[in-house]
């Protein structure tokens, strides 16, 4: 059994995946579009938008698509555990660009480093540093 997140966007899935690739998280290994290659499209507005994507990177796997009835992201976050505070701080800065930092990245009372943000696409991220 495996658990993976599936992110639903209305029309910005492709831009979000490109942003995550620019941040160094991985890349879309599979990308199918509404209305192409025999795939149905619910409307002309959705034709060409992402019907299904598989995003992969080192230790990362999630799925995503554009969905005409997608609801705003809420109640879930991607938790990334990194090996160094420097690496996590850099990634936090990239992911939070044009987004909303909710917990500034830094040392926390429990002794670890942690930060939380909502990116410009509405996806919540939690970054933590592996404690040794």
Image (cartoon, grey):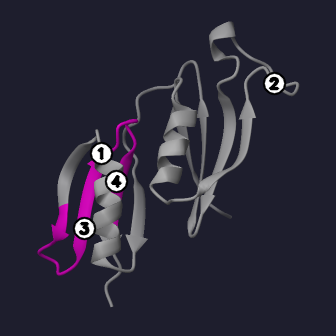
- Magenta span of residues: 105-127
Marks 4 and 1 in Cβ contact (< 8 Å): yes
Q: CA distance from mark 3 to mark 1?
A: 17 Å
Residues at badges 3 and 2 in contact (C-beta under 8 Å)?
Answer: no
Quadrant of the frame with the C terminus: bottom left
Q: CA distance from mark 3 to mark 4?
A: 15 Å
Q: Secondary structure at mark 2?
A: loop
Residue lying at 34% horizontally and 53% vertically, measured from the top left: 94
In the rendered image, the residue lying farthest to the right is 38
- Which quadrant holds residue 114? bottom left
- The residue furthest left is 109
The answer to whether mark 2 and mark 4 are in CB contact below 8 A is no
Along the horizontal axis of the image, is 117 left or right of 23? left
> For numbered disc 1, what is the local secondary structure?
loop
Give the mark nearest the N terminus, 3 or 1. Answer: 1
Q: CA distance from mark 3 to mark 2?
A: 42 Å
Whole-angstrom CA distance, mark 2 to mark 4, is 32 Å
**Residue bearing the label numbered 2:** 36
**Residue 94's mark?**
4
- Residue wearing tag 1: 97
């Amino acid at each position: 059994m495996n658990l993976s997140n599936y992110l639903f966007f209305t029309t910005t899935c492709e831009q979000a995946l490109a942003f995550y690739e620019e941040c160094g998280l991985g890349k879309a290994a599979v990308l199918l579009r509404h209305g192409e290659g025999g795939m149905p499209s619910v409307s002309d507005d959705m034709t060409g938008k992402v019907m299904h994507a598989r995003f992969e990177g080192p230790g990362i796997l999630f799925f995503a698509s554009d969905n005409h009835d997608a609801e705003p992201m809420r109640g879930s976050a991607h938790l990334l555990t990194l090996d160094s505070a420097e690496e996590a701080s850099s990634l936090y800065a990239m992911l939070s660009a044009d987004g909303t930092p909710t917990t500034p990245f830094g040392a926390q009372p429990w002794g670890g480093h942690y930060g939380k943000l909502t990116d410009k696409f509405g996806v919540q991220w939690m970054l933590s540093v592996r404690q040794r």
